[in-house]
Amino acid sequence: MTVGPRRTAPVAPAVVPALPLPAAGWSAAVDVVVVGSGAAGLMTALALAGAGRRVAVVTKGALGDGSTRWAQGGLAAVLGTDDDAGLHVQDTLTAGAGLCDEAAVETLVAEAPVAVRLLQELGARLDLDANGRPALTREGGHSRDRIVHAGGDASGAEVTRTLVEALRSAGVQVNERTVALDALRAASGEVVGLRVARIEDDGALVDAGDLRAHAVVLATGGYGQAYAAATSPAGATGDGLALALRAGAEVADVEMVQFHPTVLWQGPEAHGQQVLISEAVRGEGAVLVDGVGRSIMTGAHPLADLAPRDVVSATIAAHLAATGEDCVLLDATGLGAEFLARRFPGILRACLEAGYDLATQPVPVVPGAHYTCGGVLADLDGRTGVPGLFAVGEVACTGVHGANRLASNSITEGLVAARRCAAMLDAELPSGAPAEPAAGPSCSSGGIDPAARPAIGAGTSRHAGVVRGADGLTELTGTLAAAPRLPAGRPLDLAAVEATAVHTVATLLATAALARPESRGCHRRADAPGTRPEWQVRLAHRVDGTGHLHTRTVPLTASRPIEGVA
């Protein structure tokens, strides 16, 4: 039954393509399979191993690859004497623009300090103040200094190093250069493992087999690579979200893609992973200016350059549209070369490599696709609507971020959700062997031809960027519907898996953005600029047994995962 202001499913539902799976040549069993090795996946596996559970990690690249290690920002947690949990909760709700699950936010805020202390106990080298406590800084949307960093602007790399070393010391089974293709499901519908394959250097898939398990935890990150250019690494193609959708789970808030306001502008033809200039640079006093040095953010928001990211990105986009300029400028020259070299060594180096000296000149920046607030509909324990399938970190939509993530809440959320998910699984997993998977539907063809990737990325960037409109989104849905399918008989390879995932998430994004006729958080409609109170609802999507996409509106009080129906 559809609830909310109106039915949002399109008249002709989009089709989500299946994958032509290679046959399994082997089978193995563990208690839990964790897919992905960013902060959320690593912490989940580490906690499960510490509880004595047999756990296997599956990751497309090397252990620790993913978005976490690129994170320049830190971890948000209430640790300062002038701070309290209520302020952190309120800042998160304000940034989330009415779509946060307040109970989930309260849980995150309450458990964030524990997550930071656990990292320290595991050996994380956090930046400390003169008293030996974590040094706290401020980022956009925060009313207090509560961001914990490591190595100045290398927080994600230090979190990753800490967890990878701990996981290797725990002797956890790690399947590197291995892709998760599809969930295995029992006759009763629960997920009982994964079909996986090893990735050759040329992208070919070999040695396909079944990893059977009582639970599969998705920690595969976001889908920034659905855009032509983004801050996320090349592997962030939405594989986990697409897999969950095919397995019967709902996904939600997919239209809420956060654009980081300060991505180094390197020309109109830039593509792939872009250079990010952390929000913390503005937190230390840098300002956004136009070509003649006038402030962009003065008068746009009470917090000016430290306004929430959606506000800053939208203000920049409006300025560029009004002036015809290609970019605005970030002026950090007032911070001094010595301070920048100490506080932001990685950013300073990246800018220099691109031909800009952050210490002596304002550098050109534009908003860039950065973080996906939506994902697999789950609670903060990782439960989805499909028994046996769990999701933590950026791949999940827990309601913590709402319509716009508060800066530096993401790694914190991944760690908190991972620990909660692991504790819940340890308490509830049955003993004995996992259930037998049922024979899945035959699919000798399907998937998206990798040749479609450039058109998908270009269309998403053009029509589903910081500001969208019905005409452009309608054009994007047409582009996606016409995307060429994988030629019959062509073996499935990594490029086809990723093209299919990118197509799936772009289809969800276009569908959801077109269905939400308002502007809220990081979803901005040029043809519907106001926020409409009746649209303070979540858009949730599922596919039926034929792959057709269906959308429902869900009040926030009811936005819990529903049982899978695919």
Image (tube, rainbow, N blue to C red):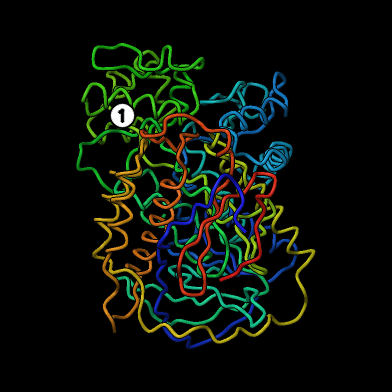
Q: Residue at (60%, 22%) from the top-left corner? A: 145
The quarter of the picture where residue 299 lies is top left
Residue denoted by label 1: 365
Q: Quadrant of the N terminus?
A: bottom right
Q: Residue at (62%, 32%) from the top-left corner? A: 93
Residue 108 lies, with reference to residue 57, above or below; the image says above
Q: Residue at (47%, 52%) from the top-left corner? A: 222
What element does badge 1 sit on? strand
* In the image: residue 551, left or right of residue 421: left
Residue 547 lies, with reference to residue 380, above or below; the image says below
Q: In the image, residue 112 lies at what x, y percent?
A: 68, 39
Q: Residues within 10 Å of mark 1 (few under 14, many from 20)?
A: many
Q: Is residue 125 visible?
A: no
Q: Quadrant of the C terminus?
A: bottom right
For this rendering, which residue is in front, 392 or 150?
392
Q: Is residue 527 visible?
A: yes
Residue 403 lies, with reference to residue 381, above or below; the image says above
For this rendering, which residue is in front, 426 or 312?
312
